[in-house]
Structure formats: C-alpha cells, structure tokens
Image (cartoon, grey):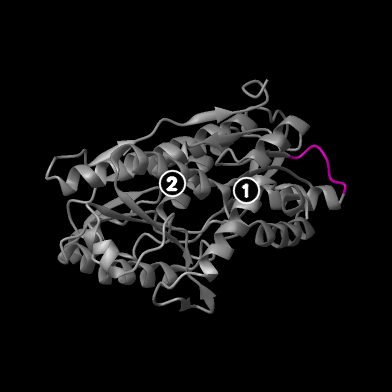
Amino acid sequence: MFFMKKVGIYMILLLIAIIFSSCSKAPDENVEGFVIEDHTKEEGDKDALESAKTTIGLVMKTLTNPFFIDMELGARKAEEELGIRLLVRTGAQETSIQQQIAIVEELIKLRVDAIVIAPGHSTELIPVLKKAQDAKIAIVNIDNKLDFQISKEMGLINVPFISIDNQQGGYEAAKYIADQVTKPTKAIILEGILGAKNSEERKKGALKAFEENKNIDLVAIETANWKIDEAFSVISQIFKEHPDIGIIFCANDMMALGVIEYLVKENKENVLIAGFDALEEAKKAIRKGAMKVTIDQQADLQGYTGVMYAVKMIEGKGVPEKTLIPIKVVDIESLR
C-alpha cells in the first residue's frame, strides 16, 4: 500500500506504542475486540498515581494516524515544562468510541486530576465525561468539539474547547483546488465519521468553496471514517459510477492517501486532491504532484495547550471558553 510502505518513523512509533501497550496492566483492556493502548511514559500502580502531585489523562482517538502522535508530542512538552504526570490513552481506531468511553471510566477509577480528550464522537462521550466531572475531574475538550446543546442538557459545563476553525480550514483547502477548475468538472467530498463536529465543519467549508465555482458539479458526498483503506474502497466504487471525476476534497490526509493509492493503481491522472492534517506523507504527495494542498492544524500545539489549560483549571484559574489554533495552508510553495 502506498501509505503503509512509506509511513516511516510514524509507524515505528506506533509499533513501539503497541508493544508497550501489550505490557500494560491497565484495566478494561478488551473493548470492541481491540486493546486499549496505554502510551504512558512511566508505569506505576494506583498508589503511585495517587501520590503524584498532578496527574492528567490525555485521551486521543488512535495512534494509527500520525496527527495524534504529533498531538502527544505537544502534550509531552507541557508535561516536561510543568512537572506533572501525563497518562496517555488511545483506542485502536478512530471509530473505537466504546473504547474511549472505557478509557475515561478507567481514568475516573485512577482518580486523575484532569482529562484532556479528543473525542471520537461529539455526543457519545458526553455521559461518561459528565461522570468524570462529577468526580471532580477537570475536563478539557480538544480537536473535535463535544455537542454544546447536549452537553448543556446533561450538565457537562465549563469545558474549554481547543481546536481550529474546521469550517475555514475545509474552505481554504477546497477553494485551493476549486480555483484551478476552469471547465465543467465533477467533484466529490470524502468526510470523516458521521456525527463528528470537525468532519461536519470541514464538509461545510468544502461545500461553500465548491458552490462558489459554477464549473464544479458535486456528484457524491461519502464517508470513509478517516481511514486510508476505507477511502480506497469508497473511491473505487464512486469511480465506477463517475469515471470522469476531476476534483476531490478529503476531510483528512489519511483518506486522501487512500484516494491517491487508488488513482496510482488505476493510472488515473489530473485529479485535483485536497487533504487535511499536513501529515508527512501528504507533504511528500504534494511534492510529487499527487496532491495539491493540505491543512496544518498544529496538533502539537493543541495537545500542549490542552494540558496547560488542564493544570490552570486544577489550580482554580480561569481559561478561555474557546481557543482557536491558527491553521496553515500547506502547498508546493510552502514546502520549497
């Protein structure tokens, strides 16, 4: 596979994390048939955790996407600067929602001081996070926004949100390729997990950009659940129905790489592709001309800021309700 052959250091880090996870003694390990990955820097039992000055749990979706590896690096920087203990937990896949719920349950039992979470779904994590908040655990929401109205109805309040303007990012990426379309062209959008706010916002931005160009005919909007292999499968089906597609917006780089893999396999050229996340493999694809643009949402800064806010909340200090990290448009010019 195009991505799997070239993922390099990210996959090495992932393998290390999986090996490390297999040795973990964390409870509730088997959920959805997968293993909850424990990427904690130092092992320790419950007594050790209780004796720590400040313990923060970082809950991410997965480590199969290099975006979250970068997020952890930023959180580790904050851990080192602040002298706190960081427990990093992830699911096996970005769709492993029940696994994330079990992870939060585990962190409640460990009595961590705060949880910084990039939720895989915008509503399904709310009840367990309310349970954590009731246990006097500070909650910080990063990356994918929890549904505000449902959170309010369930009593999950005072949860700061740190991310980017996903709609603007989707618009900027889609506009970059849309502006290159000067004749009637069929387009498609590959979105992430249905019900995830970041996916919905990116799709809205892409729709706006495509609608501004009357030459673009949007023929399909499909989900590939953020996954490279699923994107390969979905795009192959779409091309059977629409073999002359000329422009594709993917809500993350993993899906974009799956699309590229399919196009290479089928020897299809001159298809404009936009992604999102600025993964190293996406940058390589841009340099080769296989992809036009991606969006850097500075995952490391999101992780860093999330931990910083968590510590401030533990100390009783105020933090902004919403913090938007600046996005960066990554194209061939910026990579030179």
Quarter of the rendering occupied by the C terminus: top right
| Region of the chain picked out in magenta, as a range | 267-271
Query: Can you give x and y, in whole percent of width and height, for residue 251 in the image?
Result: 55, 47
Query: Can you give x and y, in whole percent of width and height, for residue 314 in the image?
Result: 17, 49
Q: Identify the mark at residue 10; answer none if there is no mark.
A: 1
114, 52: nearer the viewer: 52
Q: Is residue 269 magenta?
A: yes
Left/right placement of residue 99 relative to residue 224 reads left
Compared with 331, 72 (above or below) is below
Which of the 4 quarters of the picture holds residue 44?
A: bottom left
Element type at mark 2 = helix
Contact check, label 1 and label 2, Cβ < 8 Å? no
User: In this rendering, does residue 219 appear at all?
Assistant: no
Q: Name which residue type carries label 2.
A: Glu
User: In this rendering, does residue 231 appear at all?
Assistant: yes
Q: Residue at x 57, y 52 (%)?
A: 65
Q: Name which residue type carries label 1.
A: Tyr
336, 187: nearer the viewer: 336
Q: Outermost residue toward the right?
A: 267
Residue holding disc 2: 201
171, 327: nearer the viewer: 327
